[in-house]
Amino acid sequence: EPEVPSFIASKVSQYSCQRKTTLNNYNKKFTDAFEIMAENYEFKENEIFCLEFLRAASVLKFLPFPVTRMKDIQGLPCMGDRVRDVIEEIIEEGESSRAKEVSNDERYKSFKQFTSVFGVGVKTSEKWYRMGLRTLEEVKADKTLKLSKMQKAGFLYYEDLISCVSKAEADAVSLIVKNTVCTFLPDALVTITGGFRRGKSTGHDIDFLITNPGPEEDDELLHKGLLLYCDIIESTFVKEQLPSRKVDAMDNFQKCFAILKLYQPRVNSNSYSTSKNFDMAEVKDWKAIRVDLVITPFEQYAYALLGWTGSRQFGRDLRRYATHEKKMILDNHALYDRRERIFLKAGSEEEIFTHLGLDYVEPWERNA
Ligand code: 8DG
Ligand code: MN
Ligand code: MN
């Protein structure tokens, strides 16, 4: 057998938080098909089938070799009949007819376009689709639609926002955010989270976590200039409340889903900035970039960091593991032990893994 000898399929955990998943994926042709299937179920609000395909994709991303025969997936968790059918067809035909059907499906194509706009989710897409709208051109042409402030910004900066954010842009924005935050809060800690912390080289946005060590919190920070578009959500966290049990719970931090105006380096310079190049007034010398800013109280920082680093699937499995294997409840604010009826404090991600009885998984191994 050519396979890695130490690999034992039956020992692979069903929880991605017990696996180390880096960015090198030997099974992209399978996982791409699964992700299309999962997205289509998400558009149909079928969470069970959606998660089934996302979990299967996550298991194959972890495999240290490419699957070439059905025997290769024997004993692996999360390989239900629907998943196996897709794998079998890809092995035999090179592609999945189901995934192909979905990607050509009118409803899927419309939802894919609609949800590519910042501020448009499944609910809005459903509404537009029911109204008979099929493309973004048709949406833009329909003057009777009442768009939210977020959606208007989404259309206004559409081209910039669908182009990926590069690591260089993320680093440039990071400097700007750090400088700006530090003029208001000199001791603040600003950390990139999300995909860039997991080692990805591109992203759809840049995620930041901001905390101020020490007693006082600054809930004015987000209200101070700098942004092209900013939808500020005030903190709704209530002390002593139990962590949320929902699979995909939103947290209660003060946060801001923003669009930042990043001035591009001009011809003879190679530095990014947020101040204008006056000699190039006619050409657009900036790019709109999606930025998530999350403000967290210092004592919740480790939990927020773990939650916002993702991946989404890794976070889901951490919470599922806590609930089903440890009788604990985990969210982005806290970990609650239901047996002991206490909140478990943590000053680092390592401590949270220890509380859960899990081996530590580095951020770049959380690409589940
Ligand atoms: P990408 O931007 O490169 O596409 O990938 P990403 O960085 O992994 O995804 P993301 O959508 O920016 O989300 C980053 C992590 O933040 C993800 O694991 C889920 C987590 N997260 C929360 N709360 C929320 C929330 O309210 N909204 C979003 N979008 N993500 C959240 O913990
Ligand atoms: Mn992100
Ligand atoms: Mn984000």
Image (spheres, rainbow, N blue to C red):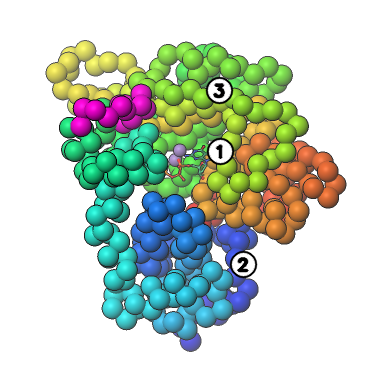
Q: Is residue 208 left or right of residue 187?
A: left
| Three-letter code, disc 3 | Glu
Range shown magenta: 142-154
| Three-letter code, disc 2 | Ser
Q: Position of residue 349 (x, y in %)?
A: 66, 44
Residue holding disc 1:
250
Mark toward the start of the polypeptide (3 vs 2): 2
Residue 13 badge: 2
Nearest to the eye among marks 1 and 2: give it. Answer: 1
Please state the quadrant of the image where ligand 3 appears. top left
| Mark 1 CB near ligand 1 (8 Å cut) | yes
162 and 195: which one is in front?
162
Residue at 24 percent of width and 60 percent of height: 104
Q: Is residue 161 visible?
A: yes
Secondary structure beneath dot 2 equals loop
**Could you give the CA–CA distance between mark 1 and mark 2, rounded to whole angstroms?**
26 Å
Mark toward the start of the polypeptide (1 vs 2): 2
- Quarter of the image holding residue 29? bottom left
Q: Is residue 317 left or right of residue 56?
A: right
Q: Position of residue 60 (x, y in %)?
A: 47, 67
Nearest to the eye among marks 3 and 2: give it. Answer: 3
Residue holding disc 3:
234
| Mark 3 CB near ligand 1 (8 Å cut) | no
Residue at 41 percent of width and 57 percent of height: 41
| Three-letter code, disc 1 | Met
Q: Is residue 210 visible?
A: no
Q: Position of residue 36 (x, y in %)?
A: 36, 59
| Mark 2 CB near ligand 1 (8 Å cut) | no
Secondary structure beneath dot 1 equals loop
Vertical placement of 252 versus 199: above or below?
above
- Quarter of the image holding residue 264? top left
